[in-house]
């Protein structure tokens, strides 16, 4: 089992930056692939970024490529999402999720565990 807790959300102006953290508990964290998703009011949850268990294969949604960076520290059981050049459309609740399988990283249905989310609000 893996429990996930996100932090670092807040209110920021467009063009600014925020760094999110996802801290995990559980002995096998290093074997899980981690993804970040976001959900805006009235919209479906959408994929943002994902990283492999080794941290060597990040991938990103086209909408955040070049602005967001995902990384992980297995010793600290933490995954990070650095968000730069934020836009109003980045507003939403950001969730981290863990999956054991190597299936499609962008599909939320492939994830086994979810955090409760942290709110990110970008004012224009």
Image (cartoon, helix red, strand yellow):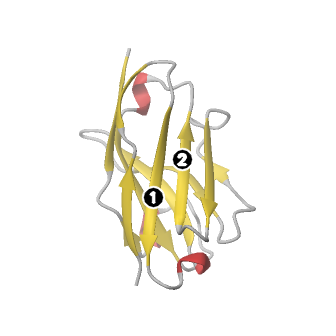
Badge 2: residue crowd in 10 Å (few <14, some 14–19, many ≥20): many
Q: Residue furthest front?
A: 76
Residue 77 x/y as whole percent? 53, 69
Residue 71 visible in the shown view: yes
* Residue designated by label 2: 81
In the rendered structure, the answer to whether residue 84 lies left or right of residue 113 reads: right
Identify the residue at horizontal 42%, vertical 28% (top origin).
Answer: 89
> Of all residues shown, which one is farthest toward the right?
56
Rate crowding at label 1 as few (under 14), some (14 to 19) or many (20 or more) other CA atoms within 10 Å: many
Residue 31 in picture, x, y percent from top left:
60, 80
Q: Residue at x 60, y 77 (%)?
A: 30
Is 61 rendered above or below residue 121?
A: below
Q: Which residue is mark 1?
A: 22
Query: In this view, which residue lies farthest toward the top?
Result: 124
- 7 left or right, relative to 53: left
Q: Quadrant of residue 55?
A: bottom right
Q: Are marks 1 and 2 in contact (CB under 8 Å)?
A: yes
State the image coordinates of residue 66 (x, y, percent, origin top left).
68, 34
**Residue drawn 56% across the image and 24% down it:** 85
Image quarter in which the N terminus is found: bottom left
| In the foreground, 30 or 123 | 30
Residue 111 seen from this side: no
Identify the secondary structure beneath mark 2: strand
């Amino acid at each position: 089992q893996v429990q996930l807790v996100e932090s670092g959300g807040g209110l920021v102006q467009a063009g600014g930056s925020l760094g999110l953290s996802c801290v995990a508990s559980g002995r096998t964290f290093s074997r899980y692939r981690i993804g970040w998703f976001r959900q805006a009011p009235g919209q479906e949850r959408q994929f943002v970024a994902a990283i492999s268990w080794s941290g060597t294969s990040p991938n990103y949604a086209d909408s955040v490529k070049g602005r967001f960076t995902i990384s992980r520290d297995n010793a600290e059981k933490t995954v990070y999402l650095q968000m730069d050049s934020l836009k109003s459309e980045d507003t939403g609740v950001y969730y981290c999720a863990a999956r054991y399988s190597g299936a499609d990283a962008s599909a939320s249905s492939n994830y086994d565990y979810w955090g409760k989310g942290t709110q990110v609000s970008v004012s224009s």
